Amino acid sequence: MADHQFDSGRSGVNAWECDENDHLNVRFYLARLAEAQGFVVHGLGIEDGRTLRPSRHHVRFRRELRAGDMASMRSRLVELREDSAVVHHALSCAGEVAASFLSVDRHVDETTGDPVAWSGAQRERLERLVGVLPEGEGPRSITLDDRSPEIDLARAEALDLVEIFRGRVAPGHCDASGRMAIEWVMGRFSDGVGNLWDSLGHDHARMLARGRGSVVLETCVRYGALPPADTLLVGRSALVGIMGRTLRFAHLLFDARTGARIADAAAVAAVLDHETRRTVAFTDEEQADLHRHVKQLS
């Protein structure tokens, strides 16, 4: 099978894109993915008046990117569904994959945003471009089609999920469609996750003072109707599982006025030692304490 992979991004890592862990923050991985989207639309030959809009992203963070690193993106179509396409992206630095993405992109009317099924001719043409997902770059702990419980803000409050973020959609946080850009969804989860760690008894400031920080190893983000500027946002999160030295988090972002879900994410997280650049195991005492905080969302 021919590999129709194509270039979709190339840039360097800026110091201002790095966080307290001294590496590229997760928001900016998604920003690079958003920039690649236009090249995907172009590379797949999507016709005028139609476009691709993401409904779900799966991301595996494979290695750190740090200030000054040069990174490039390559993309390929790996699956064609009724009215969507699954696209694989690999963000690489110095010949090594730093992050691998799977994006489920809906084929939509550019004006209305309504989904449009592929025509027979489109499907025939695009199926010739479908490639194979490289070994080792697919989902590991979270599958692409994992479904999160359908929870609105009222239900999240009833479940006593931790409020990690409260703010608004700034005009500068919207993309060309006038809606909240995908990288800012991830950014809001990232901005607020320290509040979740605090609630689990792992004071974020104390972690940093000890030379440790929290990192995401894998995540799957599901998007609802992304809101326009000035929408009020509330983010709530929970610890939903423990797997050795990793924790599984559920993050949800809501419209504060209507209570509707804007997006949710499943994430596998860990503690990073800033000196060794390796994840740190929890002590037996820490494990026992963390188990007290695990919530069932179903």
Image: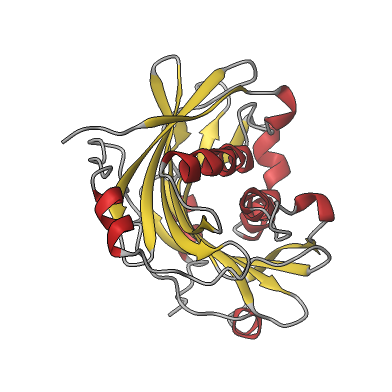
Towards the viewer: 4 or 240: 4
Q: Residue at x 25, y 50 (%)?
A: 127
Q: From the viewer's perspective, is residue 118 above or below residue 174?
A: below
Q: Is residue 238 visible?
A: no
Is residue 233 shown left or right of residue 286? right
The x, y position of residue 85, in whole percent, is: 37, 55
The x, y position of residue 242, in whole percent, is: 40, 57
Q: From the viewer's perspective, is residue 260 above or below residue 35?
A: below
Instruction: Specify the quadrant of the image occupied by residue 15.
Output: top right
Q: Quadrant of the C terminus?
A: bottom left
Q: Is residue 264 visible?
A: yes
Q: Residue at x 71, y 74 (%)?
A: 255
Q: Residue at x 64, y 20 (%)?
A: 67
The x, y position of residue 252, in whole percent, is: 59, 67
Count of numbered circles on the image: 0
Is residue 120 shown left or right of residue 75? left
Q: Residue furthest left?
A: 1
The x, y position of residue 174, in whole percent, is: 74, 54
Is residue 277 shown left or right of residue 133? right
Q: Residue at x 41, y 32 (%)?
A: 62
Q: Quadrant of the N terminus?
A: top left
Q: From the viewer's perspective, is residue 23 above or below residue 260?
A: above
Towards the viewer: 263 or 133: 133
User: Please, which colouring scheme is shown?
Assistant: secondary structure
Instruction: Specify the quadrant of the image occupied by residue 88.
Output: top left
